[in-house]
């Protein structure tokens, strides 16, 4: 017997399992009651089995090197907050968090309470700031139970949090977001002083830091950045005059790279953490290394005659005898359909064009000019293959998107494989140091 289905044939329980008829299906109530006990055996699969179709590779050493690179731009006393929201921009938040913390980051930033909870459940003990503005009771209590710091952005929210925690023995750590030009979250900069006066009268809250967010730091035009800086400094001077001297943070990745005078006490680093420059004109300012690679397998090879239509809509018609490789990855995995006919992949160190419409689970590559392509070969969509580097930035530029959207788009059905030659890759706490022991001013936290 061929080895092609050998694994399946050797699986006696699977091979001998009786066929399911409609009469043997569970009722709706029986099915629902069984869901609570269902657990996939994903952890039991080997790496080879997990990567039989397509996968994402994450180089945790690259994460650490990128933190080190960013810190070369900073003063020794300036801390780094690693932004690991959206599951670490698709890289795996807990793994990225540990790699960033080992390299010198001292804070973590997430978008939601539940993202912070997941980090705590993974054993992360570093301080975590939730960047969204929440005021509902359940999420606030969950944040408190998991030692997550909360952003405060408007008076009603602050009052609601104070009402909830006024009787607590330990006040809730909060961070004031001031809107200096982003027009998204935060108290307007002209109202910041009065807001701080309000906060001082609200029991149960402890103001830890004051921050704002740059709207155009990744643009070559510096006009708006300078205006936001002016507004922020105006606010800080007014707050210092009333005795408010909390630590300050303003810069995102672009600000950390391009504006040394905006570093203050901490910078919040997102995209650069993952090895991608936040703008093309900033790419030569640091030596960043992309941490993500995306790869898939060739599942079929076929040769088409001239004038044969390919994939949905026949948007590609062969103009010669054409050898096509079917590759097991598609838009349901995170490869944008808009890349159809514009994507280049690498196989065995050689480049090849994707042709036809990218479909939900598969795409097609013209390998006519490649002599040695076989079923089972690895195809690199993003990452290094020989002398070629394919990047999320290239994808974004091709379809008029941004690299943030590209790396966040790879779906969870793609397994993540983590690599590190310098440390363990298990997302476990590095120490038993308590949250209360962290000291911002000495570079260990805020």
Image (cartoon, rainbow, N blue to C red):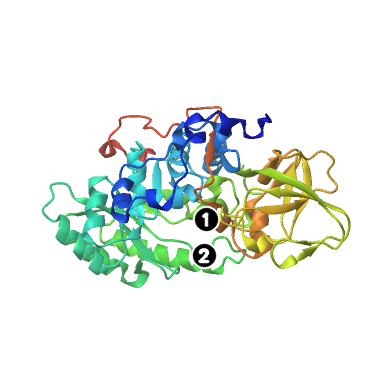
Residue under the point 55% across and 51% down: 410
Residue at mark 1? 255
- Residue 360, compared with residue 102, is above or below; it is below
User: Is tag 2's residue or tag 1's residue first in the polypeptide sequence?
Assistant: 2
Mark 2 vs mark 1, CA separation in Å? 9 Å
Closest to the observer, 13 or 181? 13
Quadrant where the image shows the N terminus: top right
Spot occupied by residue 53 in the image (x, y as percentages of width and height) = 61, 42
Spot occupied by residue 394 in the image (x, y as percentages of width and height) = 68, 55
10 Å neighbourhood of mark 2: few (<14), some, or many (≥20)? many
Residue under the point 51% across and 47% down: 413
Residue under the point 27% across and 50% down: 143
Whether residue 80 is visible here, answered yes or no, is: no
Residue at mark 2? 225
Q: Do tag 2 and tag 1 residues touch (Cβ < 8 Å)?
A: yes
Secondary-structure class at tag 1: helix
Secondary-structure class at tag 2: helix
Which quadrant of the figure has residue 107?
top left
Whether residue 305 is visible here, answered yes or no, is: yes
Spot occupied by residue 365 in the image (x, y as percentages of width and height) = 75, 51
Which quadrant of the figure has residue 159?
bottom left
10 Å neighbourhood of mark 1: few (<14), some, or many (≥20)? many
Which quadrant of the figure has residue 3?
top right
Closest to the observer, 353 or 196? 353
- Residue 433, compared with residue 409, is above or below; it is above
Closest to the observer, 59 or 29? 29
Residue under the point 61% across and 42% down: 289
């Amino acid at each position: 017997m061929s080895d092609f289905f050998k694994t399946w044939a050797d699986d006696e329980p699977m091979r001998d399992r009786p066929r399911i008829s409609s009469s043997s299906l569970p009722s709706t109530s029986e099915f629902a009651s069984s869901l609570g006990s269902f657990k996939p055996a994903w952890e039991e699969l080997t790496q080879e089995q997990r990567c039989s179709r397509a996968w994402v590779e994450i180089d945790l050493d690259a994460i650490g090197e990128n933190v080190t690179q960013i810190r070369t731009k900073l003063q020794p006393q300036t801390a780094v907050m690693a932004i690991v929201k959206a599951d670490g921009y698709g890289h795996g938040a807990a793994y990225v968090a540990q790699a960033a913390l080992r390299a010198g980051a001292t804070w973590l930033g997430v978008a939601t309470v539940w993202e912070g909870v997941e980090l705590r459940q993974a054993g992360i003990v570093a301080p975590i700031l939730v960047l969204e503005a929440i005021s509902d009771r359940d999420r606030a209590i969950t944040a408190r139970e998991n030692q997550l710091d909360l952003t405060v952005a408007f008076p009603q929210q602050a009052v609601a949090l104070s009402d909830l925690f006024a009787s607590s023995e330990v006040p809730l750590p909060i961070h004031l977001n001031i809107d200096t030009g982003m027009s998204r979250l935060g108290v307007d900069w002209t109202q910041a002083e009065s807001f701080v006066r309000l906060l001082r009268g609200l029991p149960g809250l402890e103001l830890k830091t004051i921050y704002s967010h740059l709207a155009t730091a990744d643009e070559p035009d510096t006009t708006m950045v300078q205006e936001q800086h002016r507004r922020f400094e105006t606010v800080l001077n007014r707050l210092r005059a009333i005795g408010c001297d909390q630590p300050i943070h303003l810069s995102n990745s672009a600000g950390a790279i391009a504006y040394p005078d905006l570093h203050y006490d901490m910078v919040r680093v997102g995209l650069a953490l993952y090895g991608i420059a936040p703008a093309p004109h900033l790419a030569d300012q640091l030596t960043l290394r992309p941490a993500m690679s995306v790869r898939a397998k060739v599942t079929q090879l076929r040769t088409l005659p001239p004038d044969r239509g390919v994939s949905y809509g026949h948007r590609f018609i062969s103009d010669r005898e054409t050898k096509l490789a079917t590759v097991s990855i598609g838009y349901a995995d995170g490869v944008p359909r808009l890349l159809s006919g514009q994507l280049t992949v690498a196989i065995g160190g050689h480049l090849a064009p994707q042709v036809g419409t990218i479909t939900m689970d598969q795409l097609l590559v013209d390998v006519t000019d490649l002599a040695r392509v076989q079923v089972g070969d690895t195809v690199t969509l993003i990452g290094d293959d020989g002398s070629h580097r394919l990047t999320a930035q290239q994808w974004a530029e091709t379809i008029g998107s941004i690299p943030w959207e590209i790396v966040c788009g790879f779906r969870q059905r793609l397994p993540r494989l983590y690599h590190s030659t310098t440390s363990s890759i298990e997302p476990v706490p590095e120490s038993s140091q308590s949250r209360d022991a962290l000291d911002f001013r000495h570079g260990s936290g805020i």
